[in-house]
């Protein structure tokens, strides 16, 4: 069986969109190094650990209320304003992208 050129074209388009689908649109190009640094520097886990008796990571519940990348970003915003951090939106996105990579694993 021979595939027509358009079929092959759409098949490859589909394959490449699958490969890119691993990271939600808003986290594409996020600076993960900066995100990791901000999470460590701002002691996010220390505060979470006060309320959750563990290392502070159990708070990240992918199956909970935070069920979209956008919800994750706004939660990070909320928490960082609680710290009176004046951070840029890109930095909020970078933090959220790291949490997504390590905990939430949203793909879109
Ligand atoms: C002053 C204490 C405090 C600090 C500091 C803090 N958080 Fe939080 N964070 C909370 C509390 C309390 C909740 C739970 C809120 C709720 O469930 O209503 C929470 C929840 C979250 C959640 C949602 C977890 C989930 O899946 O439901 C995320 C994501 C988060 N924080 C990220 C961060 C990040 C990133 C930082 C560091 C920049 C940070 N937090 C610093 C208190 C804090």
Image: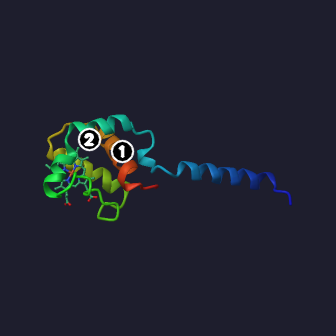
Q: Residue at x 28, y 52 (%)?
A: 74
The x, y position of residue 35, in whole percent, is 32, 39
Q: Residues within 10 Å of mark 1 (few under 14, many from 20)?
A: many
The x, y position of residue 44, in whole percent, is 21, 45
Give the residue at the far right of this rendering.
1
Of mark 2 and mark 1, the one earlier in the sequence is: 2
Above/below status of 52 relative to 77: below
- Quadrant in which the N terminus appears: bottom right
Q: Is mark 1 within 8 Å of ligand 1?
A: no
Give the residue at the far front of this rendering.
54
State yes or no: discs 2 and 1 in contact (Cβ < 8 Å): yes
| Visual colour scheme | rainbow
In what element is the residue under mark 1? Answer: helix
Q: Nearer the viewer, residue 43 or 55?
A: 55
Q: Residues within 10 Å of mark 2 (few under 14, many from 20)?
A: some
Above/below status of 105 relative to 89: below
In what element is the residue under mark 2? Answer: helix
Q: Residue at x 65, y 50 (%)?
A: 13
The x, y position of residue 71, in whole percent, is 31, 56
User: Which residue is tagged 2?
Assistant: 39
Q: Is mark 2 within 8 Å of ligand 1?
A: yes
Q: Nearer the viewer, residue 7 or 63?
A: 63
Q: Nearer the viewer, residue 106 or 78?
A: 106
The x, y position of residue 40, in whole percent, is 25, 39
Left or right, 102 with respect to 108, comes to left
Q: Residue at x 54, y 48 (%)?
A: 20
As measured in the structure, the alpha-carbon distance from the residue carrying label 2 to the one carrying label 1 is 9 Å
User: Which residue is tagged 1?
Assistant: 98
């Amino acid at each position: 069986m021979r595939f027509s050129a358009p079929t092959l074209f759409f098949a490859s388009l589909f394959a490449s969109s699958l490969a890119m689908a691993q990271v939600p649109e808003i986290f594409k190009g996020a600076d993960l190094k900066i995100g990791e640094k901000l999470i460590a520097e701002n002691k996010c886990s220390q505060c979470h650990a006060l309320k959750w008796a563990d290392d502070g990571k159990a708070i990240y519940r992918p199956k909970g209320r935070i069920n979209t990348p956008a919800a994750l970003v706004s939660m990070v915003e909320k928490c960082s304003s609680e710290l009176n951090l004046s951070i840029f939106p890109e930095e909020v996105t970078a933090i959220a992208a790291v949490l997504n990579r390590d905990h939430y694993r949203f793909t879109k």
